Image: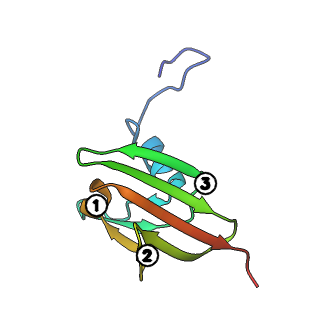
């Protein structure tokens, strides 16, 4: 960030918007600051890996369209919220998508 013609002046959000964009593209929306939950959304990437302090989290998207089914490991997820602690443990978070009917 610079005030030069090829820079971005200000850096008003100190990277907050960039972090939000990356989270959302991974399918994880940190919807309430200070709360240890994420709302799950359809990821942009087909596959991503995140090394955490407790293991590697693999996020995988299968198909295109709306979320039809989600699993963490072999466990189906029944709602669209997940605890931060569950993500830190690592494993595979799978989004199965399908086009609308």
Q: Residues within 10 Å of mark 3 (few under 14, many from 20)?
A: some
The answer to whether residue 91 is left or right of residue 46 is: left
In the rendered image, which residue does mark 2 sit on?
A: 80
In the rendered image, which residue does mark 3 sit on?
A: 44
The answer to which image quadrant residue 49 occupies is top left
The answer to which image quadrant residue 62 occupies is bottom right
Which residue is found at the position 40% from the left and 66% from the top?
73
Question: Residue 84 has which mark?
Answer: 1
Nearer to me, 18 or 99: 99
Query: Residue 13, how many percent across, how many down?
Result: 40, 40
Question: Residue 43 has which mark?
Answer: none
Which residue is found at the position 61% from the left and 18% from the top?
6
Q: Pointers 1 and 3 in contact (CB under 8 A)? A: no
Q: From mark 1 to mark 3, how far is it between C-alphas?
A: 20 Å
Q: Looking at the picture, does residue 85 appear above or below residue 67?
A: above
Mark 3 vs mark 2: which is more N-terminal?
A: 3
Which residue is found at the position 69% from the left and 70% from the top?
65
């Amino acid at each position: 960030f610079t005030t030069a013609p090829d820079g971005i002046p200000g850096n008003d959000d100190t990277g907050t918007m960039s972090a939000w964009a990356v989270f959302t593209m991974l399918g994880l929306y940190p919807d309430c600051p200070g709360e240890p939950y994420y709302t799950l959304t359809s990821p942009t990437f087909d596959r991503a890996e995140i090394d955490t302090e407790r293991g590697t989290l693999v996020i995988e998207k299968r198909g295109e369209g709306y979320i039809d089914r989600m699993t963490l490991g072999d466990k189906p997820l029944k709602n669209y919220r997940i605890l931060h602690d569950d993500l830190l443990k690592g494993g595979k978070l799978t989004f199965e998508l399908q086009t609308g009917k």
